[in-house]
């Protein structure tokens, strides 16, 4: 049962780190913005992030995935981190959290 508890804590740590990464064009973190589709953590503490960008032509398409990977790798318990970019489904404002919509004056 202890391993499961650690996995939950690691998942929380990953989300906390994701909430420190911002899209440079929108003053909201990438997690609340809905750019993170999935966070997968296996028993060996390898983390895989499935994420999207606001558009395929996003100016940070080259740097944002690398920033996510580097920051996730900086968590002590993480053995490895991999970021996969997908545009299926494409990002839309509907993926944003209520908090993000409020922050951007959309509510």
Image: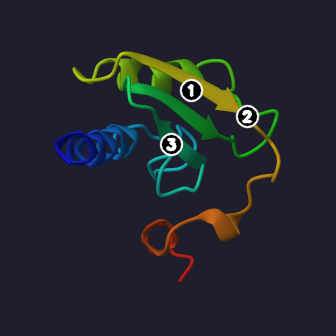
| Nearest the eye: 30 or 13 | 13
How far, Cα to Cα, is label 2 from label 1? 10 Å
Q: Residue 16: x percent and y percent?
A: 30, 45
Which residue is at the front of the view, 93 or 88?
88
Residue 64's x, y, as percent?
Answer: 56, 26
**Distance CA(mark 2)–CA(mark 3):** 22 Å
Check disc 3 and report its element: helix, strand or loop.
strand
What residue is rendered at 36% in x and 26% in y?
45
Q: Residue at x 69, y 26 (%)?
A: 61
Tell me the CA gap for discs 3 and 1: 16 Å
Q: Which residue is mark 1?
A: 64
Instruction: Tell me the residue at 25%/23% (across/down).
Output: 77
The reply to whether discs 2 and 3 touch (Cβ–Cβ < 8 Å) is no
Which numbered disc, 2 or 3, marks the residue closer to the eye? 3
Q: Residues within 10 Å of mark 3 (few under 14, many from 20)?
A: some
Percent across and percent down for residue 76 are 22, 20
Q: Which residue is mark 3?
A: 39
Q: For residue 58, which numbered disc appears in the image?
A: 2
Q: Earlier in the sequence, mark 2 or mark 3?
A: 3
């Amino acid at each position: 049962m202890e391993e499961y508890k650690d996995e939950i804590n690691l998942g929380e740590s990953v989300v906390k780190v994701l909430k420190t990464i911002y899209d440079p064009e929108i003053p909201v973190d990438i997690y609340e913005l809905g750019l993170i589709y999935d966070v997968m953590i296996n028993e060996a503490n390898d983390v895989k992030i499935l994420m999207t960008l606001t558009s395929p032509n996003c100016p940070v398409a080259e740097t944002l995935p690398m920033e996510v990977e580097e920051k996730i790798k900086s968590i002590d318990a993480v053995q490895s981190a991999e970021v996969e970019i997908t545009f299926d489904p494409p990002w839309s404002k509907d993926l944003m959290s209520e908090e993000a919509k409020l922050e951007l004056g959309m509510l």
